[in-house]
């Protein structure tokens, strides 16, 4: 055991905790991932997804988590390159969005209820809603105007 490990404890426990958290999160999300996969979709990863995962991780670990913890865990759960790029983009938005605190507050009761039930459907609803909104953007006309996108509200999460 090295000097650092003897003074501050082994880092193995931290790695085990992160792996346990990743496995617990993967297990919790499996029904949502499988449902969307059967529909030919994958989970829509954006700042709202990050907020939901943030709360699930706090509920799993029973302690505060950082955005860095969320990034590492999500990269262990969603391993494909496309997901990794979406994770990075979503975390960038999460860190700079002036509505992050509002989104976190709105998502906590949803994440807590689903976690306590041992099963969730939020990401299924969120992915379907996001997909429908994206399709609608391109169906209306060829001249998409981003200023016409409605502002996010907490009721969008219900």
Image: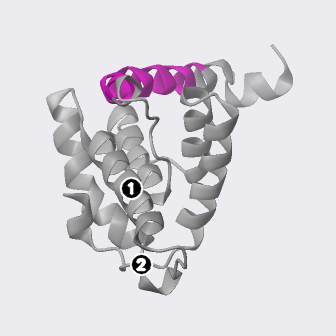
Residue drawn at x 38%, y 55% is 130
What is the x, y in percent for residue 9?
67, 25
Q: Residue 54 in magenta?
A: no
Q: How many marks?
A: 2
Residue drawn at x 47%, y 27% is 21
Residue 69 horizontal side relative to residue 154, left or right: right
What is the magenta range? 16-35
What is the x, y in percent for residue 101?
39, 70
- Residue closer to the observer: 36 or 62: 36
Residue 33, quarter of picture: top left
Q: Could you tell me if the residues under marks 2 and 1 are in contact, i.e. CB atoms within 8 Å?
A: no
What is the x, y in percent for residue 44?
46, 46
Residue drawn at x 66%, y 18% is 12
- Residue closer to the observer: 8 or 41: 41
Seen in the picture, residue 157 relative to 14 is either above or below; the reply is: below
Residue reaching furthest to the right: 2
Q: Residue 22 in magenta?
A: yes
- Residue closer to the observer: 129 or 64: 129
Residue 84 horizontal side relative to residue 130, left or right: right
Q: Which residue is mark 2?
A: 149
Query: How busy is the neighbourhood of tag 2: few (under 14 within 10 Å), some, or many (20 plus)?
Result: few
Residue 122 horizontal side relative to residue 89, left or right: left
Q: Which residue is mark 1?
A: 130
Q: Quadrant of the C terminus?
A: bottom left
Q: Earlier in the sequence, mark 2 or mark 1?
A: 1
Residue reaching furthest to the top: 1
Q: Which mark is drawn over residue 120?
A: none
What is the x, y in percent for residue 148?
42, 84
The residues tagged by marks 2 and 1 sit, at their Cα atoms, a distance apart of 12 Å
Q: Secondary structure at mark 2?
A: loop
Residue 120, quarter of picture: top left
């Amino acid at each position: 055991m090295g000097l650092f490990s003897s003074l501050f404890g082994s880092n193995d426990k931290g790695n085990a905790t992160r792996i346990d958290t990743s496995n617990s999160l993967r297990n919790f999300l499996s029904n949502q991932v499988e449902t969307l996969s059967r529909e030919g979709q994958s989970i829509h990863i954006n700042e709202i997804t990050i907020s939901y995962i943030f709360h699930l991780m706090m509920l799993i670990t029973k302690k505060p988590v950082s955005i860095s913890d969320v990034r590492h865990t999500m990269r262990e759960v969603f391993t494909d390159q496309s997901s990794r790029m979406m994770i990075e983009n979503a975390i960038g938005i999460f860190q700079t969005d002036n509505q992050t605190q509002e989104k976190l507050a709105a998502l906590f009761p949803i994440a807590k209820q689903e976690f306590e039930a041992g099963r969730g459907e939020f990401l299924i609803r969120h992915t379907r809603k996001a997909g429908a909104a994206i399709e609608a953007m391109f169906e209306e006309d060829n001249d998409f105007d981003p200023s016409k996108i409605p502002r996010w509200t907490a009721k969008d999460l219900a």
